[in-house]
Amino acid sequence: MSIAWYLAVSAIVFSLGALGVMTRRNPLVVLLCLELMLNGGNLALIAFSRMWGNGDGQILAIVVMTVAACEVCIGLGMIVAIYRRQLPIDVDELRELQG
Amino acid sequence: MSAVLFFLAAIGVISGAVGVVVLRNPFFSVLALVAHLVSLAVLFLLLRAEFVAAVQVVVYAGAVMVLYVFVVAYVGGEGDSIGERLRGANGSLSTGGSVGSGLRLGGAIVGGALLVELLIALLGTGLEATSGYGAGYVPGPKTYGTPAYIGQLLLTRFLLVFELASFLLLIAAVGGVVLARRRGGIGEADEHETFAPLDVLRPLGTGTTAEGVGTRVGAGAGVGRQLP
């Protein structure tokens, strides 16, 4: 299959992730949708890497996975802390920083 | 053969992503994301990125998703569906149903516009190479995408990136522990529950200020301690 097909799949996955981030209100699912967006980016990176026959895109994809793991670590830690304070697990209710 | 595999994997990827967004129960969302990640690894294999595909399955679909499953089992959280949010059926919110549903509908419109924009940007570039099959590929032990190739790049050209990523992982691990431990983090400080190992060996009521004052002489029957 040509590279354009992979790019189309990556665009669809990224948009679905963005839709989920904007519409879901459970912070766990928001984190999952962030993972979807990162995976869409990863697929585009690896497709372009294949296009050039060059490994730089794959290195960047591995770095993106590392950053995603860090984001999961911090995000899940925050969700557990929110749960311990018995605050609602809901991004619409957690609005203390809105000012 | 490659085209058939591509379409199977692409269907898995997109249906997994749809499942993450629309499923009501967060646990099923996590399982849909696992299916999505495994299908994505097949796409990576088709793009000759063997090492990244292996890392994707082992690290992402293995370790990170287990972490998610643990937290979902611990926290749970009420399920909500995207359809319910779009209809604004949740009247118990303080934000008000109509405003919330309007925002959700706006989110859906923005998501669709983002998809159109990305497709135009990626497919309408006029780059000749995007309609090709990629650069030439010769199978071999140290060719493009193998662990040896990736390792050589990571330890020579991208050494700084590699070290920075490891440092970032260390910071994130420490931060996760600080956030999620029982005291500290963003939780309020609860009472100190100290536990001294010597307390186990000592009889009840001895070695404390209560014993010196004499208000507590032997909590158990017959263990009363007569001071000379």
Image: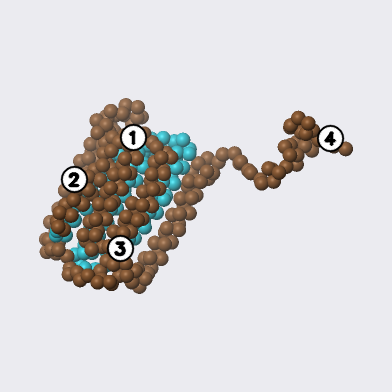
Chain colours: A cyan, B brown
Q: Nearer the viewer, mark 3 or mark 2?
A: 3
Q: Which comes sooner in the sequence, label 3 or label 4?
A: 3
Q: Amino acid at mark 3?
A: Phe
Q: Indicate which disc residue B51 carries.
A: 3
Residue B150 visible here:
no
Q: Position of residue B173 (x, y in %)?
A: 45, 54
Q: Position of residue A47 (x, y in %)?
A: 21, 60
Q: Secondary structure at mark 4?
A: loop
Q: Which residue is mark 1?
A: B79
Relative vertical location of residue A42 with respect to residue B84 in this rendering, above or below: below
The chain containing the residue under callout 4 comes to B
Question: How many angstroms separate mark 3 from mark 2 (CA)?
Answer: 34 Å
Q: Which comes sooner in the sequence, label 2 or label 1?
A: 1
Question: How many angstroms separate mark 2 from mark 1 (CA)?
Answer: 27 Å
Q: Residue at x 38, y 65 (%)?
A: B162
Do discs 2 and 4 share a chain?
A: yes
- Judge left or right: residue B213 versus residue A18: right
- Judge left or right: residue B127 versus residue A22: left
Relative vertical location of residue B98 with respect to residue B202 in this rendering, above or below: above
Q: Which comes sooner in the sequence, label 3 or label 2?
A: 3
Q: Position of residue B47 (x, y in %)?
A: 21, 61
Q: Which comes sooner in the sequence, label 1 or label 3?
A: 3
Question: How many angstroms separate mark 1 from mark 3 (CA)?
Answer: 36 Å
The chain containing the residue under callout 2 comes to B
